[in-house]
Amino acid sequence: MLAGARRRLAGGGADRGANPVELAVVMPAILVLLFASIQAAAWFVARATALNAAQSAVNAQRVLRAPDGAGEQRATEFLTSAGDWLVGWDSPGPDCVTDAIEVTCTVTGTALSVIPWVSFPVRQTAHGTVERWTTG
């Protein structure tokens, strides 16, 4: 039995050297899938970070008699402490628009990219009603 295994290994045959060739053909596809999954995860984390910042801004701005800029300040504090998942959020900065009934805050940026020369934009918006006295 041992002698038969040695003959097969020593003899080679038509399949000798096929494994490295198969690996060389399949490995680029595996690497592309690996980097694509890492990039997708980074994009989802960046979206969640932007949405949490926008919701935090709405919660700060919708309070009764909130000062102007309270939402933007809260979103900036959140994004500063959140890490670098969302890149470029500070160039336009968080934007909050308040009218008599509603607050809308938007956070924009790009996701952290593992693929060079490619950017993945992120834009998340949150809405909330303004606290106010009503008759009723």
Image (spheres, rainbow, N blue to C red):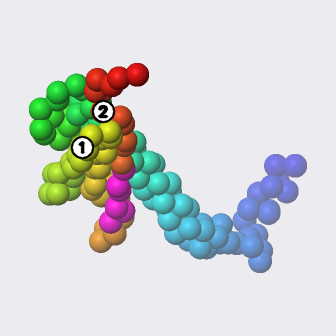
Dot 2 and dot 1 residues touching (CB under 8 Å) = yes
Residue 105 included in the magenta stretch of the image: no
Amino acid type of the residue that numbered disc 1 sits on in the rendered structure: Thr
Amino acid type of the residue that numbered disc 2 sits on in the rendered structure: Val
Which of the 4 image quarters holds residue 101?
A: top left
Q: Is residue 50 visible?
A: no
| Secondary structure beneath label 2 | loop
Pick whichever of labels 2 and 1 is earlier in the sequence.
Answer: 1
Give the residue drawn at x 12%, y 38%: 68
User: Looking at this view, is 121 or 101 the one in front?
Assistant: 101
User: Looking at this view, is 64 or 81 the one in front?
Assistant: 64
Give the residue drawn at x 37%, y 41%: 127
Q: In the rendered view of the protein, which quadrant contains the C terminus?
A: top left
User: Looking at this view, is 13 or 126 the one in front?
Assistant: 126
On the image, the x and y values in percent for residue 91 come to: 14, 57
Which residue position is annotated with label 2? 130
Between marks 2 and 1, how big is the CA–CA gap?
8 Å
Looking at the magenta stretch, what is its main secondary structure? Answer: strand
What's drawn in magenta, residue-wise?
Answer: 119-124
Q: Residue furthest front?
A: 136
Which residue position is annotated with label 1? 98
On the image, the x and y values in percent for residue 95 come to: 21, 49
